[in-house]
C-alpha cells in the first residue's frame, strides 16, 4: 500500500515537473559563458517578458527600423522608415525615415514624419540611424545620415537647430558630416560617429552646441599583430609607391556605436578586428579607455562557430553591467562592470528570445533589455530571471566590498548554476574576509583552507596565492617555537659541523685514553 | 691525471652526483675507467619522467601552468623519453661524421648526467611551491634557470670530453644537434602523415568493398 502511494506521488511529481518544463518551452535554454574560450553551459540570465509588435504599439507594421533609444522614464524612441505617398494616395518607391515614440507600456505616443524648421518642412532621408534624447533640455537629436546633418527637435517635431559639418582644419578632408550615431553629454557636447572614411578612423567627432569642432574623441588603440610587423618591415625596404600598392591598411576602425552612461562615461563598441586591442571600451572625459582589461571579441570569434560576428550596439545599466549585441549571430554578451563575462544568450532563430537581425539594444530603468530586430520587426523585451537577479545582487555586494554578505547570494547562484566560476571567486574572497570561527561555523573548515578550495574552483590563481600565504603565516605563527628551534639547530649543525666533530673526537679520544690508563 | 681516491670504489649510482660537482674530471675518469652505466641512464630518465609528472600534477595551484586535470602520462613520456633519445641520436649522427670518439652509450650517459641537477631542483621547487606564494614564485623560477644552465654546462663539458673535441667544435656539434633534432621531427611528421594516408587508403578500400 505504502509503495503504491509512493508510486502515485512520484508520478504526480513527475507530471507537475513536466508542466513546468512545458511552460518554459517558448524560450530556448541555451545560455552559456566562455571559459578560456571554451563554451560552458549556464542557466538563463534573461527571459522574454514581452514581444512588442505593431499590435501592441498600435501603429502600422514597422518597415525597416534602424535604431532604438530608451530614456530615463522608459519612453522608447525608434527610427523607422515609411514610403512616400504621392498626391493620389499611392505609395511610391521612395523611402523616408521617421521617429516613433512609444509610451512606457509600448503603446504609440507620437510618430514624427516631418519636422518644422522656420516655416520649412523637413524630412529624414532613408538610412537615418542615430538618435539621442537629452532629458535636461527635452530635445531629440536625430542623425540624418544621408542629408549630412543633425536635427535637434522637441517631441512635437519643431526643430530648434540644425548642425552640419563644422569648418575646421582637421576636417578638411571630410566630404560631409554623415552622422551615423550620436550621443550628447551633460554639457550639450555632441559625440558623433561619422561614416566619412577620411575622418572616421580618428574617433568620434566632438561638436559643441555652437557647432564648433572640439576634436576627435576616443580613437581606437591598436595592437601589434604579426602581419603588421611584417608589413612594417617591408615598408622600410620598399619605396613609397611600392608600399602604397600593398594596400593593407592598419588604421584603427571607427566605432560601431556609442553609449552615454549616467556616470559620465562613454562606452564604445568597434568592429571586430585582430589589431584592435579592445572591442568594447569605456572612455573617460579625455577619451582614454578605463577598463582594467581588454574585451577581446576577436579571440571569441576565432574559437566560436561564427567568424563573422558584428558587434553593432551595446547598452549599460545603472550598475555598470553592460550588454553587447552581436547582430550576425543574434547573441547578447553580458558583462559586469569589471569586465567579467556573466552570460551569453540569445541566438539566431525565429523563436522568442532569438533574433534574425537585431539592430539595437537598450536597457530600461527596471534592468530590462529591449532588442530591436530589423527582420522580425519587433522589439523583444527581456527581463532578468531569478538567477540573473541573484548574480546582480551578489555582484553589487561584492563590488561594495561586502564579501561576507554576498556569500548567501553566491550560494544561491551556485545552486542554480554550479558552472559559474565567478561565484566561487566571490565565496573565496568572502572566506578571506571572515574570522576563522565564522568560517568554521559556515563551512566546517578554517578560512584559508576553504578559501583555497573556492579559488581553485573559481580558477583564480592570485586569490589562491593570497589564501595560501595566509595559511602559511597562520601555521608559522602557531608553531613558531618549534620551527625556530629546528632552524637554529640546523644552522648550528651546518655552520659548526667541523667544530662539533672535533669536540666529539676529543671526547672520544679522552674516553679511550682514560680507558687505556 | 690527478689521482682521486675513492672514485674507483665509488658506486656507479653515486657518479652522477660527483659529476654534478666536478663535470670535467668526472667525465674524464668515467671515460677512462669505462664506468658508464646503462642502469644509471635508465633510472635517470625514469626519474625525469616521474619528476615531470610530479611537476604537472602536484605543483601548488597558483603556480601550476598546466591543467592538472588534463595531464597525460603518455604525452609527458613523449616529451621526456622521446626527446632524450632524439637528442642523443641526433648528436651521435653528427659527431660520428665530425670524428667524435664517443659512442651512443657515452652520449646517453652525458645527457643523463646533465639532467641530474634539473631533476633535483625541479623536485625541490615543486615542494617549494606548496610553501611559497604569489611573487615569491620568482625564487623557484630562478632556481630552475640556474639548474638548466648548470645542466647545459655539464652537457657541454661532457660532450667535449667524450668526443675529445675543442671548445669551438663542441659548440658546432651542439648547433648541428639542434638542426638534426628539427630534421628528425620533420621526418617523423612525414612518416606519421604517410602512415595516416596509407591507413585511410586501406580503410576506404575496405569500406568501398564492404558496400558492394
Image (tube, coloured by chain):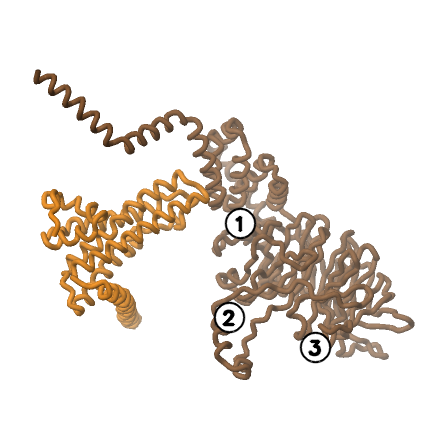
Chain colours: A brown, B orange
Q: Earlier in the sequence, mark 1 or mark 2?
A: 1
Q: Residue at x 70, y 70 (%)?
A: A194
Quarter assignment of residue A370 = bottom right
Compute the Cα span from label 3 to label 2: 26 Å
Callouts 3 and 2 on one subunit: yes
For this orientation, the residue located farthest to the top is A517
Q: Where does the image place residue A69, in percent across and percent down from the top left?
A: 73, 59
Pointers 1 and 2 in contact (C-beta within 8 Å): no
**Left or right: A258 as drawn, with respect to A17:** right
Find residue A173 and name its label.
Answer: 3
- Please, which chain is the residue tagged with disc 1 on? A
For this orientation, the residue located farthest to the bottom is A241
Q: Where does the image place residue A294, in percent across and percent down from the top left?
A: 56, 57
Callouts 3 and 1 on one subunit: yes
Residue occupied by mark 1: A42
Quarter assignment of residue A297 = bottom right
Helix, strand or loop at disc 2? Answer: helix
Mark 3 vs mark 1: in front: 3
Callouts 1 and 2 on one subunit: yes
Q: Where does the image place residue A184, in percent across and percent down from the top left?
A: 76, 60
- Looking at the image, is A331 positioned above or below residue A394? below
- Please, which chain is the residue tagged with disc 3 on? A
Q: Earlier in the sequence, mark 3 or mark 2?
A: 3
Between A19 and A335, which is closer to the camera in this rendering? Answer: A335
- Please, which chain is the residue tagged with disc 2 on? A
Between B102 and A202, which is closer to the camera in this rendering? Answer: B102
Helix, strand or loop at disc 3? Answer: loop
Amino acid at each position: 500500500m505504502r509503495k503504491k502511494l509512493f508510486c502515485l506521488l512520484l508520478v504526480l511529481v513527475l507530471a507537475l515537473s513536466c508542466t513546468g518544463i512545458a511552460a518554459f518551452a517558448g524560450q530556448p535554454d541555451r545560455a552559456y559563458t566562455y571559459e578560456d574560450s571554451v563554451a560552458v553551459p549556464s542557466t538563463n540570465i534573461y527571459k522574454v517578458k514581452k514581444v512588442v509588435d505593431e499590435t501592441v504599439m498600435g501603429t502600422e507594421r514597422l518597415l525597416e527600423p534602424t535604431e532604438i533609444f530608451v530614456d530615463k522614464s522608459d519612453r522608447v524612441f525608434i527610427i523607422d522608415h515609411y514610403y512616400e505617398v504621392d498626391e493620389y494616395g499611392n505609395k511610391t518607391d521612395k523611402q523616408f525615415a521617421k521617429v516613433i515614440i512609444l509610451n512606457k507600456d509600448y503603446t504609440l505616443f507620437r510618430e514624427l514624419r516631418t519636422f518644422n524648421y522656420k516655416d520649412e518642412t523637413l524630412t529624414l532621408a532613408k538610412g537615418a540611424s542615430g538618435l539621442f534624447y537629452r532629458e535636461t533640455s527635452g530635445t531629440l537629436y536625430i542623425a540624418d545620415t544621408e542629408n549630412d546633418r543633425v536635427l535637434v527637435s522637441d517631441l512635437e517635431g519643431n526643430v530648434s537647430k540644425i548642425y552640419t559639418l563644422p569648418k575646421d582644419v582637421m576636417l578638411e578632408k571630410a566630404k560631409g558630416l554623415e552622422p551615423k550615431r550620436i550621443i550628447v553629454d551633460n554639457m550639450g557636447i555632441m559625440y558623433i560617429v561619422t561614416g566619412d572614411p577620411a575622418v572616421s578612423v580618428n574617433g568620434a567627432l566632438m561638436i559643441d552646441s555652437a557647432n564648433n569642432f572640439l576634436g576627435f574623441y576616443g580613437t581606437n588603440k591598436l595592437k601589434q599583430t604579426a602581419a603588421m610587423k611584417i608589413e612594417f618591415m617591408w615598408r622600410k625596404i620598399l619605396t613609397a609607391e611600392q608600399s602604397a600598392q600593398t594596400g593593407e591598411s592598419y588604421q584603427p576602425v571607427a566605432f560601431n556605436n556609442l553609449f552615454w552612461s549616467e556616470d559620465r562615461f562613454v562606452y564604445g563598441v568597434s568592429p571586430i578586428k585582430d589589431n584592435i586591442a579592445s572591442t568594447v571600451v569605456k572612455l573617460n572625459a579625455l577619451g582614454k579607455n578605463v577598463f582594467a582589461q581588454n574585451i577581446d571579441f576577436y579571440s571569441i570569434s576565432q574559437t566560436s562557430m561564427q567568424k563573422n560576428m558584428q558587434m553593432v550596439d551595446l547598452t549599460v545599466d545603472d550598475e555598470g553591467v553592460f550588454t553587447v549585441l552581436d547582430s550576425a549571430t543574434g547573441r547578447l554578451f553580458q558583462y559586469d562592470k569589471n569586465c567579467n563575462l556573466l552570460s551569453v544568450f540569445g541566438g539566431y532563430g525565429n523563436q522568442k528570445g532569438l533574433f534574425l537581425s537585431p539592430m539595437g539594444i537598450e536597457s530600461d530603468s527596471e534592468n530590462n533589455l529591449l532588442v530591436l530586430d530589423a527582420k522580425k520587426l519587433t522589439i523583444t523585451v527581456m527581463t532578468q530571471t531569478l538567477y540573473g537577479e541573484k548574480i546582480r545582487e551578489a555582484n553589487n555586494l561584492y563590488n561594495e566590498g561586502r564579501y561576507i554578505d554576498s556569500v548567501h547570494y553566491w550560494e544561491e547562484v551556485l545552486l542554480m548554476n554550479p558552472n559559474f566560476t565567478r561565484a566561487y571567486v566571490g565565496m573565496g574572497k568572502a572566506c578571506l574576509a571572515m574570522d576563522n570561527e565564522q568560517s568554521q561555523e559556515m563551512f566546517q573548515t578554517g578560512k584559508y583552507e576553504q578559501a583555497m578550495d573556492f579559488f581553485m574552483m573559481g580558477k583564480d590563481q592570485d586569490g589562491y596565492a593570497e589564501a595560501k600565504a595566509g595559511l602559511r603565516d597562520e601555521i608559522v605563527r602557531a608553531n613558531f617555537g618549534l620551527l625556530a628551534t629546528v632552524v637554529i639547530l640546523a644552522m648550528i649543525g651546518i655552520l659548526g659541523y667541523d667544530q662539533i666533530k672535533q669536540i666529539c673526537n676529543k671526547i672520544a679520544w679522552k674516553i679511550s685514553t682514560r680507558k687505556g690508563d | 691525471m690527478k689521482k682521486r681516491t675513492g672514485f674507483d670504489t665509488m658506486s656507479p649510482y653515486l657518479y652522477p652526483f660527483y659529476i654534478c660537482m666536478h663535470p670535467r674530471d668526472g667525465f674524464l675518469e668515467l671515460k677512462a675507467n669505462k664506468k658508464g652505466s646503462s642502469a644509471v641512464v635508465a633510472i635517470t630518465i625514469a626519474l625525469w619522467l616521474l619528476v615531470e609528472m610530479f611537476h604537472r600534477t602536484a605543483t601548488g595551484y597558483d603556480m601550476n601552468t598546466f591543467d592538472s586535470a588534463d595531464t597525460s602520462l603518455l604525452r609527458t613520456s613523449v616529451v621526456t623519453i622521446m626527446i632524450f633519445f632524439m637528442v642523443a641520436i641526433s648528436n651521435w649522427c653528427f659527431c660520428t661524421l665530425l670524428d667524435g670518439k664517443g659512442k651512443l652509450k657515452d652520449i646517453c650517459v652525458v645527457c643523463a648526467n646533465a639532467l641530474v641537477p634539473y631533476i633535483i631542483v625541479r623536485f625541490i621547487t615543486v615542494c617549494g611551491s606548496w610553501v611559497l606564494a604569489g611573487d615569491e614564485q620568482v625564487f623557484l623560477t630562478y632556481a630552475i634557470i640556474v639548474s638548466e644552465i648548470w645542466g647545459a654546462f655539464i652537457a657541454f663539458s661532457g660532450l667535449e670530453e667524450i668526443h675529445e673535441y675543442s671548445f669551438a667544435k663542441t659548440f658546432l656539434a651542439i648547433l648541428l644537434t639542434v638542426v638534426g633534432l628539427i630534421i628528425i621531427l620533420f621526418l617523423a611528421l612525414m612518416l606519421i602523415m604517410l602512415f595516416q594516408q596509407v591507413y585511410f587508403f586501406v580503410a576506404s578500400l575496405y569500406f568501398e568493398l564492404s558496400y558492394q
